[in-house]
Structures are given as structure tokens and as C-alpha cells.
Image: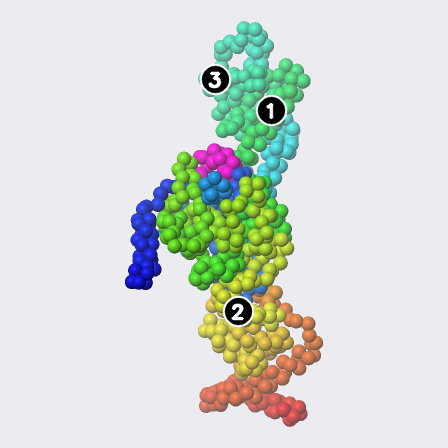
Amino acid sequence: MNTTRHWPKRAFILSRALSRAFSDTPSPTFPLKHVTRSNFDSALVELRSHVRAADFVAIDMEMTGVTSAPWRESFEFDRFDIRYLKVKDSAEKFAVLQFGVCPFRWDSLKQSFIAHPHNFFVFPRQEIPLDRTSYEFLCQTTSMDFLAKYQFDFNACIHEGISYLSRGQEDEARKRLISPKGDQLTHLSHNLRETMDLPLVRVADVLFTERMKKRLGEWRDDLLQNRVGGPQEEKVPDDLNQQFRTVFFKMRPALSLDGFTSHQLSLIRMVTRKHFKDLTYVCFNGESTSEELVVYTDSESDKARLMEEVKNDHQRSAEMKINAAVGFRHVIDLLSSENKLIVGHNCILDIAHVHSKFLAPLPSTAEEFVSCVNKYFPSIIDTKILLNADYTLQRKMKRSSTSLSSAFSLLCPEIAHGFTRNVLSYEPCVKVEVHVDEMRSSNWNSGAKHEAGYDAFMTGCVFAQACSHLGIDFQLHSPSENLTQNEKLQKHMNLLYLSWINGDIIDLRTGNRSAELSGSNMIRKPYQKILFKNIVLLWGFPSKLKPSMIRDCICKTLGPSSVISTYCIDQTAVFVQFSKAELASDFLNLKETLEQSNDAISHLHPLSQLLEGGNTRAASYETYKEICASPISKVLFADQAEAVGIKWKTELLPSDKEESHDNTRSHLESAMDSPQAVQKSKTRNTEDVVNDSSNKRFCDDIIDSFLKVEKIRRTTNL
């Protein structure tokens, strides 16, 4: 009886003891597969085989920053298209320093996934000449401090990081290096035509050309006289022996030119062209060095063959240089060409970086962006979407943070902490085994956190466990089955959080905003509905004013219920959401009227506190979009608006001008009739006003203004 009653407790104690015993066993620790430019070629060959065999590929990145200014953070009042513009700005301004790629392949014999994590160090180094002088990117101090905290190897990144070219840059490089217009090797076309008529102004140039003509002539004559016996010792000055050296080029005798200036080489080209039909000037660019040569040719046909051979060598050399300069983009091309399922965690910014760095400049609209992404990567899964798509997963996450590290710890404790689940566990478990070179483990720890390769590995593990919770049984998975076609994943495919904070989801198939997932509201607090046509953007107001004070100023003028809310962008700008679109238009009209007038009513108006200093600007929501679309990034929003060129813009909603004027006058009169305005006028220092003549005139203006208002009140029965 007692034994039966205490059995559950004993079983629990036993399971805890077993769990503790397993947890005391240290998990195998070995480093990631770090890839730099020194081992990139071999790693790419290895990665290619892993990707082709993979069921899905997880990715992650480490960047130099996220937001270029505080006001470019994701805000509650950001419209869908604005959120994309902020993602676009981040991807354009910051650099990718690490790119994690981890292919996952299901092994039916081991009944587990085999993961191959790769950690690529990436650095935007210019390997070949392009139009731009050099790459530039921003660094956000918080991001750099975060990387340094986790021992990020900045030296390895900068000195050994793999460079890259986007598709557009590669096309540009091919036009410059391979096209006939870019042929700088034989100097037999436009370059020679330029040097043919090179004016010989200086005496030194005349003497140099005569000297070279004699030297080349002697060398050519010696060749013709000694073709059977070979070249004899030449009696020339020591300096010429150092600058001229007889070699063979393409099975032809040639003079290698060394130690000459570029101007002297131009003169030698001219001499060769004008005075020697059987000599050809060639600039040969080898793999590491370039060489200037004067080559002897037997005939015009032999010269033509030489030119063709040099041209072909040039094209092959240029191809090799371009392929080497493409660098890390070969990995992106591999992922695209193999058409694998790409898995990321909250990865909209990662995908934007891929587009910006490796495909083409980011377009101005989300619709164009998703069209290009869908072309190269038609199947993308965001694990953050999966974690919020299933109620069971939400409960397992205990409504806590859905960050990658939290999800990994809760869904993959065996891998994250290196122990086996207790014997009473009934939850589904997908096994993962890690292979790095010759090392392998089923509870692996890389020993380093927040490296892109390890984060990509964690992302893939979270995806595998989330799939199991969604009802996907990998034990029934066959090697021929494509996860991109799985029915249970289809409804979550190509949906990314454009803003996790606000629950905005972008559909990569259409570019449109997707309906929020069921259950997401359980995690984030619900936000009030925002009507963007009711919003007015204010910036440049006096620094002493807080959002609540701005609201009070407007409510005193347009009524206590005129403003629903104010939202602070930064200390220099706010959003004001009105209860009606007409009130937003009335406010903009009223502000403009007050700023154009300089009478007593304007000075005593409740809005005068907001307009003090004459720097306050107001505009509709579309102006905010225009400011966010600018590539400029100032720290303060008011400075940004001024830099963009928006200093005074009041874009009004369509309305009748006369009606707007009548509304403005009514607001002015009602403001003067308000108790606050009357009280303000009573508290003025009367003695100072009477004693000063200018103030006396101001007092008269106030009295006249009150009389006018009183007359209007009586006329309109107010």
C-alpha cells in the first residue's frame, strides 16, 4: 500500500538522478568549420556536395549594425511600406562580417539529421577595379561591442575575410576586363593610335626615341643575322643590359622591358609602331605581375596570330580574376541553383542583405524586392513564424522570448546542454548529429556563442523540432522527398516577419502584407488601430515640449477629444494621431495661418507655445515616407528632414479652401474665448505694458482684437 502510494515520487527522484548523471557528462566540444580566403576553394567543393544532398539549409549572419539612426528603429506608427524602407536602409548601410551556412540531411539509417555547419568570414574587399573607389559601410557601436563581447575575431575577418562581387558588379567587371573596349594588353588598337602622334616637345624625349630606335634596330638585326647560331653577346651600356633582356614569348624572341617609366614605355610603343613592321609591342598581364615586351614576328599573319593568342590569354586571365573576385557569392549561387529550402530565424534582414550584397541593389518597394527574392530563393521558412503558428509550441515556449537562443534551449535541450531527456519524457525529439571535418557528435558544442555558423546550426535544430511539433514525422521521410512540397509546411512557406514587434508579416510570393498568425496576439500586446490619414508628423518644435504638452496645446485648440494619441519618434519629432482626418487637415491649415499672421491673437493662441521659435514643421504621413526613403541618415529626425530638403511642407487632404478658411477663423475665435486664453491675458504684467509706449500699442492691438472677436460672436450668435 505504502509502496504503491510512494511509487510516483520514487520514479520522479530516479528520473532526476538519471538526468543529473547524464548532464554531468561533458558534451563534445570542437570548433566550427571556419572558412577564410585561404581555405575557401576547398571548403566550397565540400559544401557543394553537402548542399546537394541536404533536405534544407539553415543560414545566419553577423553584421556591423542594425539601425543607422534611432528614428530608423521599427515603430508602432510605421506603415507596412515604411517598415520595408527601414529594412532596406539597414541592409544598404551595414556590412556582413560572418555568414553561417549549415546543410541538414536526414539519415534514415541513423534516424537523425546530419548537420555540416560552416562559418564564413566575409569582408567587402575590392579585388578588381570597378567604378567605385572602395566599399564603405557603417558600424553601430552596440553591435560591434556585442561581437567583441563574444570574442569575434575582427583580425581574421579583415585580413582573411572572403571578398565578393554582386551579380551587377560581376557584369560590370566583365565589360571592363573582357570586352574589346577594355583590352589593354596588346596596345594595338586605340592606345597605339594615341601614342603614334605623341608630340616630342622635350629634347630628352627626342633623344630617348632616337636611342630606342637604334637599340631596337640593333636587336632586330642581330636576330636576323644570328637566327641559326643564336644571339651573341651584345656590346651595350650596362644600364641598357639591365633594362633589356632577351626572352621567348609565345615561341617568339622578345625583349623584356624593365625599369622604364610609363612615359618612356609610351615612347617605346610609338617607336615600335612607326619604325618596325616586324616588331610588336605587347603588355602581358600574368597571374601576379604584368610584363612589357617587344616581340619579333615573321610576317603580318604571324603578328595577327600573336595578337589573337594574347587576346585569348587576356580573356582567360580576366575570367580567372573575375571568378576569384566573385568570392563568397559562389556560395549564394550554390544555394540558389540547388533550389533548397532556406531556413532562417527572424530573417527578413538576412534576406535583404543577401539581395543587397550578392544580387542587386535593393528596390524601392517591397513588391519589387520579393519578386527578385522569389526568383532566386523560391522556398524560405522563418522559424519565428513556425514558433508562433502552433499553440503547443507557444505553450512550450511559455510565452517567453522567441529569440533563437531561447528557442534552442527549450526545444533542443539535449544538444544545447549536452544531456539526454529523462525516461518519462513523452515529447517528440528529432536527433541531430554534427559533422565537422573528421569529427562528429550528437550533443555538440562549438565553444563559441553568437558565431554565424553556430547560430545557423541552432536555427536548423529549432526548425527540425518545430516540424516535429507540426506533425511532420521524419522517420517516414524518404531521401527523394522534397520538404518544399510538404503540405504541412506550405502554409508557412515564404512568410517573414517584416516587424516582429508589430506582427507585420510579408508574403514573399506577393509582396503584400499577410494576415497575422493565429495565436500571435497571445504573445505581443495588442496595438490600437492606426489610421494613417489621421496622422500629422511634427518636428523641429521647442526642445522643452514633451509629447503630452504638444497634445495639450492641440486639444486646447481643436477640442479635448481631437487627439487620440501622440507617439515620440525622438526628442525632435512626434506623430500626432487625430480622431478624424478632417482635424488633421484643420490643424495643418491653422498652423499655416498662425505662422503667416503676426497679430495679438496669434501670440496668445494656445498653439503659440508649439510654434515658438519659428522652426516647427508639420506634414502628412507621406512626408515621413519620403524622409525614410532617403539614403541620408542623420542622428536626429529634425536634422534628417532638413538634410533631405523638407523644411516646410504641409500636404493637405483634398478640401474646399473657403471651408478651410472658415474653420481656421472659428478655431481662432474659440481659442480666444477659452478660459485658458483669457486667464493667460489676465496674468500679464499690466504696469510694464502701460509704462512702455511700444507695449501700449500692443495693448491697443489686443483690445481691438477682442472687439473684433466680440463683434463676430454677436453676428454669428456664438
Mark 1 lies on a secondary structure that is helix
Indicate whether residue 549 is drawn in magenta: no
Which label number is shown at residue 630?
A: none
Furthest residue in direction top, as rendered: 229
Label annotation for residue 527: 2
Disc 3/disc 1 C-alpha distance (Å): 26 Å
Q: Is residue 430 visible?
A: yes
Residue displayed at 31% across by 54% down:
14
Asked whether, in this view, residue 701 is left or right of residue 12, the answer is right
- Kind of residue at badge 1: Val
Residue 132 makes an appearance in the image: no
From the image, tell me which residue sits under label 1.
310
Q: Residues within 10 Å of mark 2 (few under 14, many from 20)?
A: few
Secondary structure under badge 2?
A: loop
Q: Residue at x 66, y 21 (%)?
A: 304
Q: Earlier in the sequence, mark 3 or mark 1?
A: 3
Tell me if residue 332 comes above or below residue 246 in the rendering. Answer: below
Can you name the residue that lies furthest to the front here?
1
The residue most toward the left is: 2
